[in-house]
Image (spheres, rainbow, N blue to C red):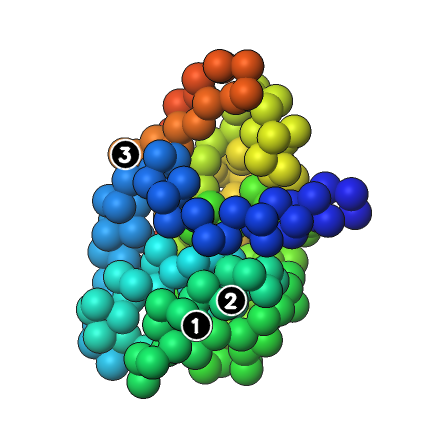
Amino acid sequence: MMERTSSVRYFEEVAREWDDLRKGYFRDEVREKALDLAGVRPGERAADIGAGTGFLSEALLGRELEVVAVDRSSAMLAELERKFGGHPGFRSRGGDTEALPIETGTIDCSFANMVLHHVESPDAMIGELFRILKPGGRAVLTDFERHDFDFFLTEYYDRWPGFPPGEVAAMFRAAGFASVEEGPLGEVCQAESSAGVRAMVPIFFVRAVR
């Protein structure tokens, strides 16, 4: 529980600067590739899980989807509302990624970008991605691969040091998804420790159909 509390506090503190910080961690191409993997279409209803300040939500709204953005940080939710609260197709909801405040079977496509390594129970979150989707709905998860950089855990309060893509794909299959594919996204997450250690970790994707 200590890791969870620290993670929440960290995101509360950096919410106002998160857009600028994020640009140093990974490129905008991450979200464009995620949306393309999902094959999003105008008018669909999308869920942005662990939305932060709306990195994915912004792109989804730009492609004319309705968006339900979920985050557990009140500061991040405030930023979401400040940026997108006036958009008729946008809704933000406070809640846990492992018990989503979204009705069962109401979402066309769900996204989780760089959130799995923060959650206490990855398989529970993936089960929630399955629950909220309509039959035939698509889920796309993007995160970084397993690594050995301890400062991600101590300075950025990550819960997990990344994941083997095949392990995450197996969680999707266990959750009940009919079709699951994983692979390299062709992007990296980069960060630097307070001691000057530089890390570049490959990002993978899992695409699944309910």
Q: Within 10 angstroms of label 2, few (less than 14), some, or many (20 or more) residues?
A: many
- Is tag 2's residue or tag 3's residue first in the polypeptide sequence? 2
Sequence order check, earlier mark of 1 and 3: 1
**Which residue has dot 2 on it?**
77
**In this rendering, position of residue 113 left or right of residue 13:** left
The reply to whether residue 133 is visible in this rendering is: no
Which quadrant of the structure image shows residue 179?
bottom left
**Residue that badge 3 annotates:** 186
**In the rendered view, would you say 76 is above or below 194?**
below
- The picture places residue 108, in percent across and down from the top left corner, at 37, 74
- Residue in the image at 46% along x and 53% along y: 16
Query: Residue at coordinates 62% horizontally, 69% vertically from top-left?
Result: 95
In this picture, residue 88 sits left or right of residue 200: left
Amino acid carrying label 3: it is: Gly
Rendered residue at 40%/40% (across/down): 21
Q: Are marks 2 and 3 in contact (CB under 8 Å)?
A: no
Residue 70 location in percent, x, y?
51, 67
Front residue of 39/173: it is 39
Q: Identify which residue is drawn at 59% across, 75% down.
A: 101
The quadrant holding residue 60 is bottom left
Query: Could you say which is closer to the camera, residue 63 or residue 173?
Result: 63
- Disc 2 to disc 1: CB gap under 8 Å: yes
Q: Percent position (x, y) of residue 12?
A: 59, 53
Query: Real-space Cα distance between discs 1 and 3?
Result: 31 Å
Q: Nearer the viewer, mark 2 or mark 3?
A: 2
Q: Which residue is mark 1?
A: 81
The quadrant of the rendering that contains the C terminus is: bottom left
Disc 1 marks which amino acid? Glu
Q: Is residue 62 above or below residue 86?
A: above
Q: CA distance from mark 2 to mark 3?
A: 30 Å
Q: Image check: 86 left or right of 68?
A: left
